[in-house]
Image (tube, rainbow, N blue to C red):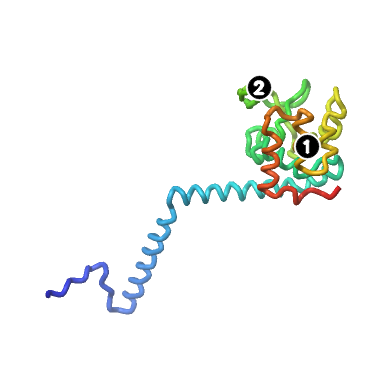
Amino acid sequence: MAKRRQRKWLKIPRGKKERRRYFIALLALLTLVGAAAFLTPQFLAERQEAQVEDQRSKQLKSWAPYAQQLQRQYGVFASISLAQAALESDFGQSALAVQAHNLYGVKASAGQSSVTLPTKEYQDGSWVTVDAAFVSYPTWQASMLAHAQLLKQGTSWNPTQYAHVLSAQTYQDAAKGLMTDGYATDPDYATKLVQVIEKYHLHRFDLAN
């Protein structure tokens, strides 16, 4: 049988320098082939999701010390302040958070500095999009402070509006208290808050009562 001719590109050079270059090129080729195997749509999607989660965790950690300070002053669980900020502002990435440092979707009253943006509200059993004026804060700390003061001092028509939130002994009860006290119209608001708290382990930031 005739000896099969070796393909030119597979032929290993005889010279020492040529062989070294050959193996370096071969290693580079194999590395590229291996890397390409990972660049699948699923791999890229998982990598992007991991990057998003990492960014969210970093954002929450940057807010946490001030949320703990506010818990000492006003008695609102740090985990609740953080979870509400995350849920309402898309972890600080919403247009309202970026443009106006408004982390809680607080609407503006007459005379307050504000921005007008579209928002979704739960009305009559369904979600609708409306334009609304929201408070524009100078810093995100100012937004968190106003939120804590609201829960502590209540509204102008009811100073004890958020009594169930303040008297809660656990973050779960505080989340339910927000619904009981009429903070949000979303029927799943308390459940969503608890999910955020437990997913990102925000209860580790809560101070002992």
Label 2 and label 1: CA atoms lie apart by 29 Å
Q: Position of residue 65 (x, y in %)?
A: 77, 48
Left or right for 109, reference 187: right
Q: Quadrant of residue 63?
A: top right
Locate residue 90 relative to residue 178 in the image: left or right. left
Q: Position of residue 39 (x, y in %)?
A: 43, 53
Considering only vertical position in the picture, is 36 above or below 8? above
Q: Residue at x 17, y 72 (%)?
A: 4
Q: Position of residue 6 (x, y in %)?
A: 21, 71
Residue visible at 28% across and 74% down? 12
User: Could you tell me which secondary element the residue under label 2 belongs to?
Assistant: strand
Q: Residue at x 56, y 50 (%)?
A: 50
In the rendered structure, which disc, 2 or 1, sits on the residue that comes first in sequence? 2
Indicate the quadrant containing the N terminus: top left, top right, bottom left or bottom right. Answer: bottom left
Residue 123, numbered label: 2
- Look at label 2 and name its amino acid: Gln
What residue is disc 1 on? 142
User: Badge 2 local density, few (<14 within 10 Å), some, or many (20+)?
Assistant: few
SS state under label 1:
helix
Instruction: Tell whether label 1 touches label 2 (CB within 8 Å).
Output: no
180 sits to left or right of 59 = right
Residue type, label 1? Ala
Work out whether 122 lies above or below 195.
above
